[in-house]
Amino acid sequence: MKKTYKIDVDCANCANKMEQAANKTPGVKEAVVNFMTLKMNVEFEEGQDPKTVMGQVRENCKKVEDDCEIFL
C-alpha cells in the first residue's frame, strides 16, 4: 500500500534526514521525501497498519529534525 503525506520542513537537508529516518522505520518498504512539493510518499510492507507505522515514522523524524511535521 502506498500513501502520500503533506509535510512541513525548512530545508532540503532536513528533508533528506526525514527520508532516511522514515526508511529505517519498521513497516516502511520505501519512503521518498520531496522538498519541492513538501510531500512524503510512503510504501508500507505487506500487512502493516499505516496509522501505526506513520506514528513511529513521525517519532523517528522528530528525533533527527525536531521542527519538522508530518500531517497524518
Image (tube, grey):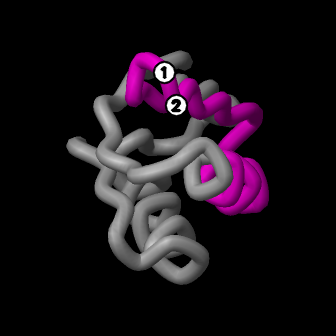
Disc 2 marks which residue?
35
Does residue 33 show up magenta in the picture?
Answer: yes
Q: Name above or below for residue 51 compared with residue 61.
A: above
Give the class, few, some or many, for how many residues have Cα within 10 Å of label 2's Cα (few <14, many ≥20). some
Q: Is residue 26 visible?
A: no
Cβ atoms at labels 2 and 1 below 8 Å apart: yes
Disc 1 marks which residue?
36
Q: Which residues are magenta?
A: 16-40
Q: Looking at numbered disc 2 in the image, what kind of residue is underneath it?
A: Phe
**Percent x, y of residue 41:** 53, 24
- Residue 23's disc is none
Q: Name above or below for residue 37 compared with residue 30.
A: above
- Tell me what residue is drawn at x 67 percent, y 43 percent: 28
- Tell me what residue is drawn at x 41 percent, y 78 percent: 66
**Percent x, y of residue 54:** 42, 52
Q: Is residue 63 visible?
A: yes
Number of numbered markers:
2
Q: Name above or below for residue 47 compared with residue 68.
A: above
Front residue of this view, candidates 25 and 46: 25
**Percent x, y of residue 59:** 44, 74
Numbered disc 1: secondary structure: loop
